Amino acid sequence: MKNRCLVSSVALVSCAALGGCGLMPGGSGTTTVTVWLMKDSVTDEFLDRFVSAYEKEHTSVELDVRIQEWTGIGDKVLAALDSDDAPDVIEVGNTQVAQYAESGNLRDLTLEAVRDLGSEEWLPGLAQPGSINGAQFGIPWYAANRIVIYNKELFALAGIDKPPKTRDQWIEDTEELNAGGTQGIYLAGQDWYTLAGFIWDEGGELAVASGGDWTGTVDTPAALRGMAFYKELQSLGNGPKNSDEAKPPQADVFAKGDVAQIISTPSSARLIEEQNPELKGKLGFFPIPGKTADAPGAVFTGGSDLIVSKNSHHHSAAADVVKALASTKWQTDLARTMSYVPNKTTLAGVIRGDASTAAMAAGAAQGRATPNSPQWANVEAKNPIKPYMTAVLEGQDPKAAAKAASEGITRALNSD
């Protein structure tokens, strides 16, 4: 690695590890590419490996990596993109790309996507949000999605020797588990990301666009079927009807040992084992089942894309950095280091030895993202889907509650 610091609000790699700091990046004959990455997206060790290898292979390039906090990042990125001193490469949440593309300050990376990056193999939940009006502005970097975490011991006591592959079998197993002081599943009433997957499985959508306007669609027959399945599953445990999975944290509930299943990302397993070490070795993982055994159920795919600023002074060099980060070599390293799902369905095998990540990768192949609107953040700010879910679970008319939620989504998506 060249003799200079990677800078951030909190030092990413210590000066000692780098063998001394103090020289400003961008010496004579070099191009400095500024990269913004989000806090905790990668380890110091991964970044050290990537930067060292990249600079060794590209001797005229220095990477100036700056770590950003998620809090307030939207406004910070928009301001940076509009400046004359914009960072070259920025990691963004996959559902944020539309908001940044609307500014007109992103570089179109369609050519690189098709020519160099094998875009036809990308996870749909990362690729689709990065594509705006047929142009690829966001390059998929990594993904994470929900799976089912289960207590193997409770499954064995109920006589269940393998995870379910279909929704019907899932319900049947969960009914068996929901007895004798055991909750078949702990599912909070307002876990709307999980609901979204059930809606997509039924052929429904959260919202659709037509002629430049958006319409909320959680009141369609398909979406109502998704909510009906959610209600049936949620009833097979004691999850609260009027709060989400964070209130209380569902990992805390599972750690008590009397819950057979939760729907969460694999990171919850570590939290569960920290709280209850007796559960180490007793946790299992499977993708959320689909309507048939042919494929897992649809899931919301979270994760990150990489964008390049239109105001970057180093377009070519920035694109090369993105291509490296999205390459098979570094996708494999990143997935194994961070237990992420790599950006391509064809790379799922690189994390096969990790049961939780393998289950996540299987589900990610059926991944989706929220409606690709710059205003989707307005929906999540007040989120009319959550009270709708509670209303249905508490016995109110599903059609009426869904119509009110759809109207709220429509207003939020069409507001300035």
Image (tube, rainbow, N blue to C red):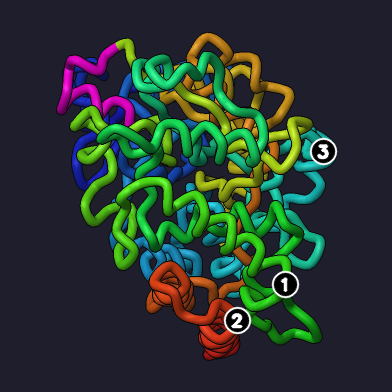
Residue 199, label in figure: none
Q: Was residue 279 drawn as part of the magenta stretch in this picture?
A: yes
Magenta stretch, overall SS: helix
Residue 221, label in figure: 1
Residue 354 lies left or right of residue 76; in this view the side is right
For disc 2, the neighbor class at 10 Å (few under 14, some 14 to 19, many from 20) is some
The image quadrant that residue 49 belongs to is top left
Give 94 or 214, whichever is nearer the viewer. Answer: 214
Q: Which residues are magenta?
A: 268-280
Spot occupied by residue 159 in the image (x, y as percentages of width and height) = 47, 17
Residue 18 lies left or right of residue 299; in this view the side is left
Give 376 or 134, whichever is nearer the viewer. Answer: 376
Secondary element type, mark 3: helix
Spot occupied by residue 115 in the image (x, y as percentages of width and height) = 84, 37
Secondary element type, mark 2: helix
Spot occupied by residue 40 in the image (x, y as percentages of width and height) = 32, 37
Residue 12 lies left or right of residue 123; in this view the side is left
Residue depicted at x 57% and y 73%? 374
Please indicate, yes or no, whether residue 23 appears anywhere in the rendered image.
Answer: no
Q: Residue furthest front?
A: 180
